Amino acid sequence: MTTTDHLRRSDDELLRSCIDGIVEEQFPGKSCLIEAVQRNRSRFSSFYASDVITVRFAGGDEYKIFLKDFGSFDHPKDSMDQRRDREVAVYRDLLANSGLGTASYLGAVLDEGRGRFWLLLEFVEGLPVSHLEFDDWVPAAAWLGRMYGNFRDRRDLWGNCDLLVQHDASYFDSTAQAALESVTGFSPELGRRLEPIVRRYAGAVKTMISQPPTLVHGTYRPAQIIIDKARQPQRICPVDFEKAAVGASLYDLTFIADGFETPRLHQLFDSYRAEAERCGVRVPDNAEMTYVVDCFRLHRIVNWLAVSIARKYEAKVIHKLVGMAEEVGALAL
């Protein structure tokens, strides 16, 4: 038996042990009825390898578990260990019992010696919002309002989680400075175009950090929001909390609102506001919200520029991003 075969066998044995424990916890006395366990790659697996574990019981019932393998990835990312630990903590400590429809935390395997970093979650059926029509984006905006209302006054939870990213002034300022250094190193001419935006960036920072703090998803992109429309009411389940943070809820809304104009933009805003206010949280009117979202849009562009060289963006992409920064900067600064 080769070393690889031995490690694979050990992985299978460890996984089966985890599954037995999960099944016994979820369905007491049923682990002895497991007839087969099948592991298949998720069709939505992306940067990290993600698998769907199907447990088959005597009698034909099935139970599915989602496994995110932090030890299997395409290329290294910044702060990967922090991202991993943060997501585990968010599912385990913050989202549990929140009633928000997120996947239930079932366990984690963190073995530095063998490079095993598994996050085990409830498998949630459905499709990402990015695969659906605009009408399905609207309830995703409402979910954000509900999350805001749920966590706005739960500082006892997110305020004591040191793993969360802090969306404070230093976070936004350092991103802008990194963008200027990166772009100037690539092209002094582009750097001169970006410099006045960075010089006036403090105004946008003041707006962004003045918003009421809460738990923030961090990358609330349509591809990371699953909707199960077969359920009534439908279930909305955001995933990938690697960049969860303490900051403004509108930071998240910017991800799904970006690129839309009225009336659709206001549909998203209104849906978000209605759910937040139903939970007892006041939300700005559309005019003020548009301005705040524009500030966060500018931050997203600045952030892309900050990592553009390290991620080897093409020259035409960097030129386009600087142009976008000028366009959005005219609205936000």
Image (cartoon, rainbow, N blue to C red):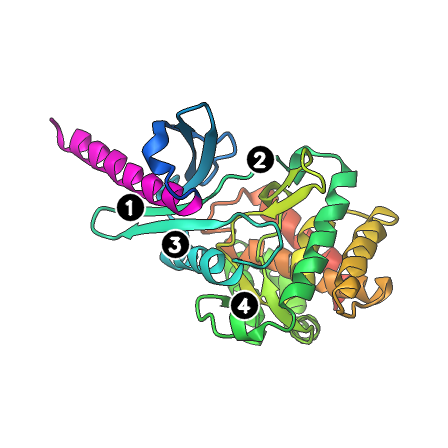
Mark 1 touches mark 4? (CB < 8 Å):
no
Q: Nearer the viewer, mark 1 or mark 3?
A: 1
Mark 4 touches mark 3? (CB < 8 Å):
no
Name the amino acid, label 2. Answer: Glu
Q: Which residue is mark 4?
A: 177
Q: Earlier in the sequence, mark 4 or mark 2?
A: 2
Q: Which residue is mark 2?
A: 125
- Residue at position x 26%, y 47% from top? 115
Helix, strand or loop under label 4: helix
Helix, strand or loop under label 2: loop
Cα separation, mark 4 vs mark 2, equals 42 Å
Cα separation, mark 1 vs mark 4, equals 36 Å
Residue 11 magenta: yes
Cα separation, mark 2 vs mark 3, equals 27 Å
Q: Which residue is mark 3?
A: 80
Disc ID at residue 170: none
Disc ID at residue 116: 1
Residue 146 place in picture, x, y as percent: 70, 59
Q: Main secondary structure of the magenta part?
A: helix
- Residue at position x 47%, y 62% from top? 93
Image quadrant where residue 55 sits: top left
Residue 51 place in picture, x, y as percent: 42, 34
Q: Earlier in the sequence, mark 2 or mark 3?
A: 3
Name the amino acid, label 3. Answer: Met
